[in-house]
Amino acid sequence: MKKISICVPVLNEEENIINAYDKIIEIFKEKINSYDYEIIFTDNHSSDNTEKILLDLCKKDKKVKYIRFRNNFDYDKSILEAYKHSTGDAAIVIDCDLQDSPDLFTKFIKKWEEGHDLVYGVVKSRKENFFLNFMRKFFYIIMNLNADIKYPLNAHDFRLVDRRVINNFKDNSNLFPYVRGLTFALSTSPLGIEYDRENRKKGKSKLGFYNSFTYAVNALLEETFFFTKVFRRISLILFFLTIIGSLINFFQEFKFINLFENLVLILLISILVLLSIVCEYVTRIYFQLKKTERIIYEKKINF
């Protein structure tokens, strides 16, 4: 009997855990009962009753597995660790709020059985404001700019990944992974399935504007700026702006002073942004090369 690992990242989700657990169990009992399963909850150091609820579930059901991190290592690290600890022939990531319906498990598994090693959800519509929708699409347009791997505009982490793909990042210890990028990069036969995303019914989203922004920056750093022509082109543009600024400086006496001042301001801001990106990237290189052994787990239950 084939086994499916269900990976559920959580952070302060006390209001949603039982509902998510019940719904997942229901799907396996009623619609995909020919498959074995496990449910892996990865907890980014929740401060509410999430830990207690999950410990109780682990006692009640040995198919439920629980990892609690010593600190909040962010969403993508939580997903990566769930993949690495999974034992199924395939793994499905789903958020605890069930904005992505577990009913789609059947479609994911069907397409996987047909030979696709990555089956991902593509959001056809979502109930949020126009600005957020626009920013999400704009993010992927930037991601795809000169990138070797073209990402679908409305796909996120709700996906099924084959064991062959998961095995390729078993030893990945990156503290700042971009897991969507990893799965696409390692997949040979990806397939998207469209669906409508629902509103969160209970609790509050842990992303928010700041976390969404930092997530986007991390993804761009990991997948775009340093692995495509984008970074080199930005550097080239800054070089030419410097040349132009020098020429304008030479002709200041011909009343170009206002234009010069504005250009210098733009140039300085651009250089600061570039330096920030470089510093962030150098920090990541340092952590990767140092390879300091870190204990990131506080608890592991039922493994």
Image: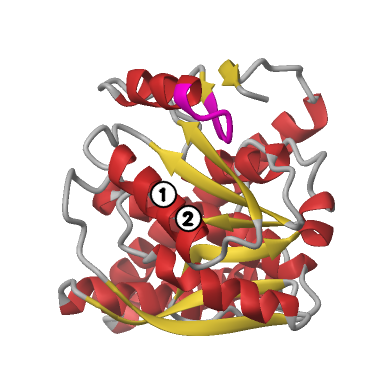
Could you tell me which residue is drawn at 82 percent across and 39 percent down? 171
Q: Answer with left or right where residue 173 lies relative to residue 51.
A: right
Residue nearest the observer in this picture, 274 or 249: 274
Could you tell me which residue is drawn at 64 percent across and 83 percent down? 191
Could you tell me which residue is drawn at 73 percent across and 76 percent down? 113
- Please state which amino acid type lies under the numbered disc 2: Val
Residue nearest the observer in this picture, 130 or 236: 130
Q: Which corner quadrant holds the C terminus?
A: top right
Can you see residue 215?
yes
Span of residues in magenta: 60-67
Where residue 35 appears, x then y in whole percent?
A: 66, 58
Residue nearest the observer in this picture, 156 or 118: 118
For residue 64: magenta? yes
Q: Which residue is mark 2?
A: 217
Can you see residue 145?
no
Residue density around tag 2, few if under 14, some if 14–19, many if 20 or more, within 10 Å:
some
Where residue 270 appears, x then y in whole percent?
A: 45, 61
Label 2: state its secondary structure: helix
- Location of residue 251 by image quarter: bottom left
Give the answer, above or below, for where 227 lies relative to 179: below
- Please state which amino acid type lies under the numbered disc 1: Thr
Residue nearest the observer in this picture, 209 or 300: 300
Q: Which residue is mark 1?
A: 214
Where residue 238 appears, x then y in whole percent?
A: 55, 69
Give the answer, above or below, for where 293 lies relative to 30: above
Please report contact status of discs 2 and 1: CB closer than 8 Å, yes or no. yes
Q: Which corner quadrant holds the N terminus?
A: bottom right
For residue 115: magenta? no
Rounded to the nearest angstrom, the CA distance separating label 2 from label 1 is: 5 Å
Residue density around tag 1, few if under 14, some if 14–19, many if 20 or more, within 10 Å:
few
Where residue 281 appears, x then y in whole percent?
A: 64, 45
- Location of residue 164 by image quarter: bottom right
